[in-house]
Amino acid sequence: MKHGFIGFGHIAHALYAGLAQNPSNTFLYISKDSRDEPIEAAADINELALWADVLWLCVKPQHTSEVFGELAHIDLSEKILVSPVAGLSISALQKHLGTNVPIIRIMPNLALAYGHSVTAYCASEENDIVKHVQASLETMGTVVRLKEKQFDLFTALFGSGPAFLLRVLQVFETQTRELGISEEKAAALVLELLAGTTAYLRENREKSITKLIEQVASKGGVTEAGLAYFDDNAVGKKLEEMLRVAERRSEELDN
């Protein structure tokens, strides 16, 4: 299958890394950046659109109007358009591109490249190529079919989630360096902490997270003291508020 990337930033790189695992896929891209990319560049968006079976809209939200203007004069009726652009609904895409092109809206994260993304998915219609794109996404992690109105919260949780979790880990890394450990070693230790915690959770999936926390937190111990501060100071509530702020921003982009 021929995949054309409109824009080739971080998400496009991650999608390419996942899709390239299938040797039957071929690729072209177009981008305003002049970086040395691993795939061939098209001369213009017209060449890209005419060549591709699947068009991946991987530009920033503020650049979509320019792209729509260029695509408006191209027959896309035999194509599939896939959009990971935050806040850009299927109806908005149809307003600019018409209803004769099947549209898939996705919300992945950068773990696509490593086969561990959690990706939300919805489509304007179902056909064999749409199903093929969904199957391709499933090789890059877990795909969750959602109603489009659920995308804003999903974006906050799983699209932005890696950055939020990394910010928490950054605190652990900074505190680890207080032990006199180098930045590189501190990062490695925090990575091992995350890997071990993930393995602990994965191996005990039949138990709730609350139960697993109880297993770590001994009565009257160090962990219990830290968790008491967490609860008494509503740290969990603050994290929920952070997610709601991100969700509202996604809703604003929809409008």
Image: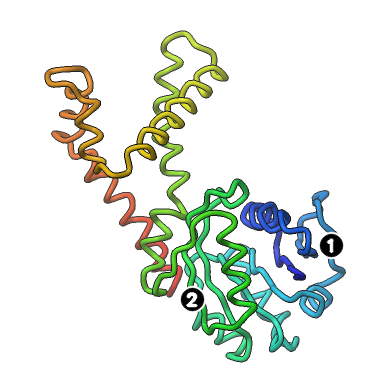
Instruction: Tell which of 151 and 23 is nearer to you.
Output: 23
Q: Residue 209 bears which disc, if any?
A: none
Which residue in the protein does label 2 denote?
89
Instruction: Tell which of 168 and 249 is nearer to you.
Output: 168
The quadrant in which the N terminus is found is bottom right
**Element type where label 2 sits in the image:** loop
Relative to 147, 4 lies left or right: right
Q: Quadrant of residue 248?
A: bottom left
> Where is residue 198 shown, x and y percent of the image?
41, 36
Please, what is the three-letter code of the amino acid marked with disc 2? Ser
> Where is residue 140 shown, x and y percent of the image?
58, 55
**Element type where label 1 sits in the image:** strand
Which residue in the protein does label 1 denote?
41
Mark 2 crowdedness (10 Å alpha carbons): few <14, some 14-19, many ≥20:
many
Alpha carbons under labels 1 and 2: distance apart: 28 Å
Mark 1 crowdedness (10 Å alpha carbons): few <14, some 14-19, many ≥20:
some
Instruction: Tell which of 227 and 72 is nearer to you.
Output: 227
Q: Residue at 42% across / 17% down in the picture?
A: 176
Q: Residue at 62% across / 70% down in the picture?
A: 133
